[in-house]
């Protein structure tokens, strides 16, 4: 840990400004917007290419009596995007239904068999959310069997785009014609759905209340899909979490209470609410989560919450067994971990890939059998490795398969992706990835480095209640806006105590002075907690020597009492 120097006491305002300046928020206007409880950073929905055409088509079809099918994905982004779109469709009083493909039988995205079923159910309009932007063959088929198609999505588009109206903030210039790129390309699928609903509300003169009805779902899906919480996304999540905490949607409030969440914030969404939503799609059907959030019936809400909690408990048990199985098969010297897991429940493959990525600091792909000689793959990657771009190049370079390429279906973004491929192409995939990683390492020998840097320094005396309160103004925290990390240099540990089974956690205080007597303001004590590493670091904790710490400041209010504590992530000797 390279901490440099810090030699003076600062106010909370100075510390907050320093953090934001380092993150590129510099001008008075930018600072005011970032810290505001009522941010205004949002854009005209009609700036999204295709929105005007999509709104015109949908309203025309609804007026003509067409039935609308909203086709979504089986993750939290897809679930919430369906719920967002429902706010406008209910207000339009149209005949609509939704369809979510089975993760196990159909996989991600549009498929021909599903389109046949949707057409048979009487749909005249297919409106996708969080999928479909590159489904050229499927959208062409939907049109051929008599459906009008509107795609709303946020995934990458390279050389191929769906053959219909496509609304996607990542749409490249080659497909934009004379239109300009959307100012915030990082919207989640639910965010794109919300912009479409905004446009519908404006053009059809629907009540503005439908936007409030939708924003809590936008917040949940945006955090859940791990898109950067900057720019318009930050605005959407700030307003959305405020609405979620107001209890406007009874089902969301009761789900939060059932999993012991006192507040709905970005961290609780990411680690509490989203796993329960995703568990429904991983273990059974994502429709169970949609039914929860679309319901106002108390009895149904209770049943659905019970189901989601059961699914999540089952998911955690299966996930841990699969994780341990994978650990036994990894040597530890792989540059890109690729595992073929015949017996893994495919619903948890993505989570396990993410955990392995975090542990080994390597990109990970796990493939599972999909039947009929096919494999489903899911990948997770490191900040410096765009896994979508890597696999896209591998797919294009599959010479022995000609124009067919390696993948039957493929989609994702730089940190995560999914695909479907024939089993006989698996070795070609592994070879292609190795060649790509070799090239990337030539360009950047530190490709696998995942650096954890401090936002700024902290003296124990600076870390009071005032700073704890001020830091909350930087929320929502998540991708692109992490909880600030602080470095403390040359501090001394006092009264270490060990907690938990076998003493794996520790609590202690730190001070800036070696002397245990009177202290100046700079040398006030600060409470600290170290999780999971206490025994391996016990010698440092009990040494009495000066140490450096890296971690975050946690502010809590419990029964009217405020306190702050430093959550330690790294610790070593100061010398």
Image (cartoon, rainbow, N blue to C red):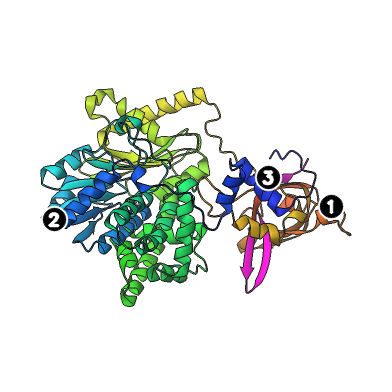
Residue 513: image tag? 1
Mark 1 against mark 3, which lies toward the viewer?
3
- Dot placed on the residue nearer the N-terminal end, 1 or 2: 2
- State left or right for residue 241 relative to residue 115: right
- Residue 253: x, y in percent? 43, 69
List the single residue furthest toward the bottom.
Answer: 299
In the rendered view, tell whether residue 378 sits above or below residue 91. above
- Residue 541: x, y in percent? 74, 53
Q: Residue at x 15, y 54 (%)?
A: 123
Quadrant including the N terminus: top right
Mark 1 against mark 2, which lies toward the viewer?
2
Q: How crowded is the residue under tag 2: few (<14 C-alpha within 10 Å), some, or many (20+)?
A: few
Tell me how far mark 1 sits from mark 3, CA to CA. 20 Å
Residue 565 lies within the magenta run: yes
Local SS, label 2 = loop
Residue 64: image tag? 2
Local SS, label 3 = strand
Tell me how far mark 2 sits from mark 3, CA to CA. 60 Å
Write the start and end of the magenta stretch as one range.
Answer: 555-575
Mark 2 against mark 3, which lies toward the viewer?
2
- Name which quarter of the figure residue 162 lies in: top left
- State left or right for residue 144 relative to residue 406: left
Q: Main secondary structure of the magenta part?
A: strand
Tell me how far mark 1 sits from mark 2, CA to CA. 77 Å
Residue to which mark 3 is pinned: 456
- Dot placed on the residue nearer the N-terminal end, 2 or 3: 2
| Badge count | 3
Observer able to see residue 444: yes
């Amino acid at each position: 840990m390279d901490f440099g120097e810090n030699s003076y006491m600062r106010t909370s305002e100075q510390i907050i400004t320093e953090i934001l300046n380092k993150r590129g928020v510099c001008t008075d206007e930018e600072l005011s917007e970032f810290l505001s409880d009522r941010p205004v950073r949002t854009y005209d929905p009609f700036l999204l290419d295709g929105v005007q055409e999509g709104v015109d088509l949908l309203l025309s079809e609804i007026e003509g009596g067409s039935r609308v099918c909203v086709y979504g994905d089986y993750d939290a982004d897809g679930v919430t995007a369906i719920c967002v779109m429902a706010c406008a469709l209910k207000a339009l009083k149209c005949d609509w239904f939704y369809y979510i493909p089975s993760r196990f039988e159909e996989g991600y995205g549009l498929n021909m068999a599903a389109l046949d079923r949707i057409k048979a159910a009487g749909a005249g309009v297919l409106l996708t959310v969080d999928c479909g932007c590159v489904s050229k063959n499927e959208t062409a088929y939907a049109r051929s069997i008599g459906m009008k198609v509107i795609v709303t999505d946020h995934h990458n588009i390279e050389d191929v785009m769906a053959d219909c109206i496509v609304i996607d903030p990542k749409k490249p210039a080659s497909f934009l014609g004379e239109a300009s790129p959307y100012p915030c390309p990082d919207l989640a699928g639910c965010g794109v759905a919300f912009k479409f609903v905004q446009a519908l509300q404006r053009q059809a003169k629907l009540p503005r209340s439908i936007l409030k009805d939708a924003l809590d779902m936008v917040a949940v899906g945006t955090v859940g899909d791990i898109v950067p919480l900057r720019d318009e996304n930050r605005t959407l999540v700030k307003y959305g979490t405020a609405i979620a905490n107001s209890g406007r949607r009874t089902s969301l409030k009761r789900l939060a209470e059932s999993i012991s969440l006192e507040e709905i914030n970005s961290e609780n969404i990411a680690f509490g609410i989203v796993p329960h939503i995703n568990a429904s799609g991983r273990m059974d059907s994502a429709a169970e989560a949609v039914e929860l959030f679309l319901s106002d019936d108390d009895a149904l809400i209770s049943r659905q919450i019970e189901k989601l909690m059961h699914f999540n408990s089952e998911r955690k048990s299966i996930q841990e067994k699969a994780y341990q199985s994978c650990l036994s098969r990894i040597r530890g010297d792989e540059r890109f971990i690729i595992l073929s897991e015949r017996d893994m429940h495919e619903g948890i493959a993505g989570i396990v890939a993410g955990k392995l990525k975090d542990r080994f600091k390597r990109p990970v792909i796990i493939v599972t059998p999909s039947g009929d000689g096919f494999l489903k793959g899911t990948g997770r990657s490191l900040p410096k490795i765009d896994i979508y771009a890597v696999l896209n190049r591998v797919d294009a370079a599959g010479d022995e398969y000609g124009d067919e390429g390696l993948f039957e279906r493929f989609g994702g973004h730089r940190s995560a992706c999914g695909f479907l491929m024939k089993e006989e192409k698996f070795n070609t995939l592994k070879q292609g990835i190795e060649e790509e990683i070799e090239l990337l390492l030539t360009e950047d020998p530190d490709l696998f480095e995942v650096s954890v840097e401090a936002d700024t320094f902290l003296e124990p005396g600076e870390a009071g209640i005032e700073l704890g309160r001020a830091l909350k103004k930087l929320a929502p925290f998540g991708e692109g806006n992490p909880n600030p990390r602080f470095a403390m240099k040359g501090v001394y540990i006092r009264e270490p105590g060990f907690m938990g089974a076998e003493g794996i956690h520790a609590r202690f205080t730190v001070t800036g002075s070696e002397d245990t007597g009177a202290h100046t303001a700079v040398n006030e004590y600060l409470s600290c907690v170290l999780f999971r590493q206490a025994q391996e670091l016990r010698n440092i904790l009990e040494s009495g020597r000066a140490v450096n710490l890296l971690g975050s400041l946690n502010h809590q209010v419990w029964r009217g009492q405020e306190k702050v504590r430093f959550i330690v992530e790294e610790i070593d000797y100061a010398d």
